[in-house]
Image: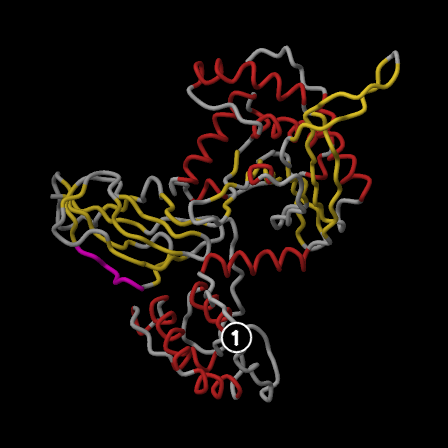
Amino acid sequence: MANFELIMPKMGESITEATILKWLKKPGDAIKQDDAILEIATDKVDSEVPSPVSGVMGEILFKEGDVVAVGKAVAVIQTEGASTSAAPAQKVAPAAVSAPVATAVVAQTSAAPTGDRFYSPLVLNIARQEGISMSELENLQGTGAGGRVSKKDILAYVENRKIAPLQATQVAQTTQPITEQKPATETVAPAKSYSGNVEIIEMDRMRKLIAENMVKSKHTSAHVTSFVEADVTNIVLWRNKVKDKFKERYNANLTFTPIFIEAIIKALKDFPLVNSSVDGTKIIVKKDINIGMATALPSGNLIVPVIKNADQLNLAGLAMQVNELANRARNNKLKPEDIEGATYTVSNVGTFGNVMGTPVIMQPQVAILATGAVKKKPVVIETETGDTIGIRHMMFLSHSYDHRIVDGALGGSFVRRVADYLESFDGKREI
């Protein structure tokens, strides 16, 4: 028998560790390649880790709730083949990680604690969100390796803390919170009471992260939104004509989204400053065009999978990518790398019947476009023989941009250019 070490995978460029949520296999269990071995959590995504080999589950090196560094062995899998006692177990990183629960936001961890005790970013983030002071955290007994406080430990403490709010308030009043340096005399606001017929719902971890990052984006970027109405009649008629043929040829539905993305890509090439990010006082203009597309999850939350190098794809390629990523998002099969690296984002609010919206910028990008519902409207049509009124398919484009970098002329010109490309769509185009 040969021993292979299952390695904690890298869940994103900014992730250095993960918390083991649950072991799905126990020692002695038969394992097939790509079987899910364990569930892990980071501040970015909760995921299942698959086995890269077939064999039998051997030793489990960490308990549930332990925080493990990326690249460290978490378990040993026994496989068929020769093994020598002198040779160390081979390390094999998982080939892919599926994400049953994922989010497009990344929580910002607080400053490192002043004591010698180590806390994972996940634990610090939960502590900050729950208003747990550093003194409370240092007095919390951990069940992880070396007495480390695990996610399970702090969540149990949060739950017990709610049962005894008076005691928790007294402690918080005499200690310093993790988030920032505040006077020791500052007190925690008393718990609010709610009158009337209400239901109180505690935010889950994902919703807390989304809320934090949306507020952070508003505090970071000077949001301005420009609106343009576009006549997309040619697109609607063309799609209705070719969608069955497209389905037959590519075994995929042709939606409006890839057509919108194609127009956005052309406009980004015309206005490259919109395809940038901000790093302090530096503007980082991106040469790659990676389009994020906001997609609804079964939970009702939104995630933003990314079409990498979208400018290198034709319309059929874009349609295939849109369908693939949307299906994987709805079936909780996205990988961590699928939600990284976007340089510009589009959100199709028309999917929900909305005619327009004011989307929030995905940091550190500098702009985001919302496409509204396509509606039939009476429109004045200019002709050589005079004006006439006709029924046209119209939609609103809403472009939110960071006014620190993108001025009104640039932001408005960009969304107008997107509309121009949509309106000039060739209705005789071949698929």
The residue under the point 51% across, 43% down is 340
- Which is the main secondary structure of the residues drawn in magenta? loop
Report the residue marked by disc 1: 178
Residue closest to the eye, 352 or 178: 352
Residue 62, quarter of picture: bottom left
- In the visual, does 122 lie left or right of 234? left
- In the visual, does 353 lie left or right of 55? right
Placement of the N terminus among the 4 image quadrants: top left
- Up-down relation of residue 373 to residue 318 (above or below): below
**x, y percentage for residue 76?**
20, 51
- Up-down relation of residue 391 to residue 153 (above or below): above
Start-end of magenta stretch: 59-65
Kind of residue at badge 1: Ile
Residue 336, quarter of picture: top left
**x, y percentage for residue 59?**
17, 55
The residue under the point 60% across, 48% down is 362
Callout 1: 10 Å neighbours few (<14), some, many (20+)?
A: many
